[in-house]
Image: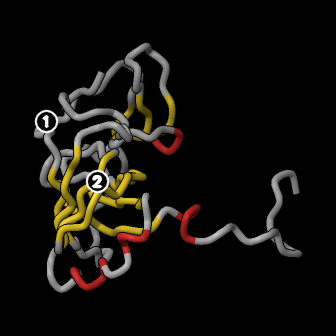
Amino acid sequence: MVRLQEIRANEVAVEPPPPTDAGLVFIGRIRTPWTSRLDCPRQGRRDGPTCRIEIFEPWVAALAGIEAFGQIEVIYWLDQSRRDLVLQSPRNDGTTRGTFALRSPVRPNPIGTSLVTLVAVEGSTLLVRGLDCLDGTPLIDLKPDRCQFSPLAAPQPGDFQTGD
């Protein structure tokens, strides 16, 4: 169950270092039906509600050609997430895992991603299905689904191989 700011049994929080400017620029805002983490789905669904991604100027021109892709990756800033847990108990069952072993929104740098279905492009707005973030979430970036954009390159000599 989603929770608001509580720490469950066996979870561990740390004092994060002061933030530094990574130079991120929010390029838009995401509009969804969810205003509370308690109502927001844990994962986006392809049959979920149509949501809006509003692109700010001067980035609107960067949408040129995006309609050619049926799926896009949406990268966003989870501005209402905690940033201090290093161990989490996502099911509240007493077991814990490290934050980097989870897809939890609670992260040192709360960046979220969703692979969404592009329904339509209306000027500076994208209509999509498959999001799982709160209304007003800041948008970091958009990318075509890598599988639709280009095939993965064949392994090359010297590439790292699992088991090396």
Is residue 47 placed above or below 127 in the rendered structure?
above
Residue located beneath label 2 in the image: 128
Task: Give the mark nearer the N terminus: 1 vs 2.
Answer: 1
Image height of 79 relative to 58, above or below:
above
Up the image or down, 101 lies above or below 8; here it is below
Mark drawn on residue 36: 1
Viewer-side label of 1, 2? 2
- For the residue pair 124 and 79, the one nearer the viewer reads as 124
Residue depicted at 18% across the width and 86% down the height: 58
The amino acid beneath tag 1 is: Ser
Mark 2 residue type: Val
Distance from disc 1 to disc 2, alpha carbons, whole Å, reads 20 Å
Callout 1: helix, strand or loop? loop
Taking the image as shown, residue 30 lies to the left or right of residue 69, namely left
Instruction: Point out residue 12 in the picture as x, y percentages from the top left corner.
Output: 38, 33
In this rendering, the count of numbered labels is: 2
Q: Quadrant of the N terminus?
A: top left
Image point 30% across, 82% down: which residue? Answer: 62
Q: Quadrant of residue 41?
A: top left
